[in-house]
Image (cartoon, helix red, strand yellow):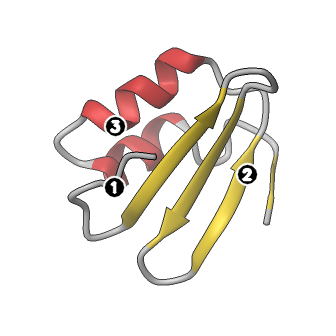
Amino acid sequence: MPYLRSSAISRAEYIRQSSTLQIWFVESGGPYDYYSVPERVYLGLISTRSAGTYFNDYIRDQYSSNR
């Protein structure tokens, strides 16, 4: 499970079998589950320079979620 160098997101995990992205936020904890997320989106999140910006642009409000 990758830990991210981000002021917004502390770590993320991708469950390939269910296409679920789990995210732990610095402020609110987690995990928050995002469903039907393509693996490429997860790979983008863990490799970007700004995980918070990437989350806002490509994940937030794009996929159904549950905490």
Q: Identify the mark nearer the N-term, 2 or 3.
A: 2
Residue 10's place in the image compared with 33, above or below, is: below
Q: Is residue 53 left or right of residue 67?
A: left
- The disc at residue 39 is none
Residue located at (25% from left, 61% from top)? 6
For label 1, count other residues whose C-alpha is less than 10 Å away and answer few (under 14), some (14-19) or many (20+): few
Residue 1: horizontal and vertical position, in percent? Answer: 46, 46
| Amino acid tagged 3 | Ile
| Amino acid tagged 2 | Asp
- The disc at residue 3 is 1
- The disc at residue 46 is 3
Q: Identify the mark nearer the N-term, 3 or 1.
A: 1
Please state which of residues 2 and 9 is positioned toward the viewer in this rendering.
Answer: 2
Q: Nearer the viewer, mark 1 or mark 2?
A: 1
The outermost residue toward the front is: 1
Measured in 3D between alpha carbons, the distance from the residue under mark 3 to the one under mark 1, in whole angstroms, is 9 Å
As helix, strand or loop, the secondary structure at mark 2 comes to strand
Residue 61: horizontal and vertical position, in percent? Answer: 67, 46
Quarter of the image holding residue 28?
A: bottom right
Q: Is residue 26 left or right of residue 21?
A: left
Residue bearing the label numbered 2: 33
Residue located at (68% from left, 22% from top)? 16
Q: Is residue 45 left or right of residue 4?
A: right
